[in-house]
Amino acid sequence: MGSLAGRENLEEEKNSVFTWEVKANDRAYNNQFKEKIFLCLWRNKYKDNIIHTAKYNFFSFLPLNLYEQFHCMSNLYFLLIIILQAYITANAPKFADQITASYQLLPWFTLFIPLVSLLVIRATRDLVDDIGRHRSDKTINNRPCRMLVGKSFLWRKWKNLCVGDLVCLHKDNIVPADMLLLASTEPSSLCYVETADIDGLSVTRETNLKFRQAPMVTHHELTNVRKMASFQGKVVCEEPNSRMHHFVGCLEWDGKKYPLDSGHILLRGCKIRNTDTCYGMVLYAGMAAG
């Protein structure tokens, strides 16, 4: 009896963390979920697939960069010395003359010019780096992929993807978002992926290939585009987290539940290898991707 109660409590605890619900081919259902930002401000819980790695924009660059630079104690110290010297020179000339004669106090602008030069050089470097990030973000967000629209797969950009969308990938394609593998052209819907880019490993392609497999129910049922267009399965799982190679969830479809784990998931940034075609359902998009 105690063992049964323990299993029930474990199951309840497990289900309590499953707060991420994504329904296939139903953006209206997925957009109903909101999260509170502050007080009465709410936003969509599921973000789009646009990524932003740049730190600044046109309006925030100057104030934010100055704020970051004056977090450096040496810059702040020299600024305070300059203010103190300027104040003494302007408001207490006799006292300033005595200090200058005794300690040979340098004029305030002799420190101000090097400080400004240092700030400009640092800001220029940060600006160049951030322009590179903006260009990289734009290139990635505009990569093409085939997304199910209506009853056919059409070419769209990565930034147009949302959770619940179905995507068709081919050999050598990069996975545009974390997704559930639904089917592939390989036997038993296997899919081979290269994970060197996300693992950070400099190993050969042959030793770095991993395989993923679609759930048997979707492998048998989703055999053509028409069936995928009518697919209304719902994935209930944990929210995005830092455990990249860990996933727990379930697929709810036609009144039945099918367990899911990391072996069913294609991670963003993986490259499809040795697989002609595979199909996936977006679970995590954009910066929310786990």
Image: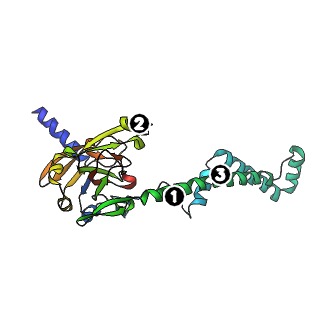
Q: Disc 3 residue type?
A: Arg
Residue 161 x/y as whole percent: 34, 60
- From the viewer's side, name the closer residue of 163 and 238: 163
Question: Which residue in the structure is indicated by mark 3?
Answer: 122
Q: Which of pointers 2 and 3 lies earlier in the amino acid sequence?
A: 3
Q: Is residue 38 visible?
A: no
**At numbered mark 2, what does the secondary structure look like: helix, strand or loop?**
loop
Residue 28 x/y as whole percent: 26, 66
**At numbered mark 3, what does the secondary structure look like: helix, strand or loop?**
helix
Q: Residues within 10 Å of mark 2 (few under 14, many from 20)?
A: few
Residue sitting farthest toward the left: 1
Residue 109 x/y as whole percent: 79, 55
State the separation of the CA atoms marked 2 and 3.
39 Å
| 3 and 1 marks in contact (CB < 8 Å) | no
Left/right placement of residue 145 relative to residue 236 reads: right
- From the viewer's side, name the closer residue of 230 and 19: 230
Q: Residues within 10 Å of mark 3 (few under 14, many from 20)?
A: some
State the separation of the CA atoms marked 1 and 2.
29 Å
Dividing the picture into quarters, in which one does residue 74 lie?
Answer: top right
Question: Which residue in the structure is indicated by mark 2?
Answer: 204
**At numbered mark 1, what does the secondary structure look like: helix, strand or loop?**
helix
Dividing the picture into quarters, in which one does residue 128 lie?
Answer: bottom right
- From the viewer's side, name the closer residue of 250 and 88: 250
Label 1 vs label 2, nearer the camera: 2
Question: Which residue in the structure is indicated by mark 1?
Answer: 135
Left/right placement of residue 212 relative to residue 218 reads: right
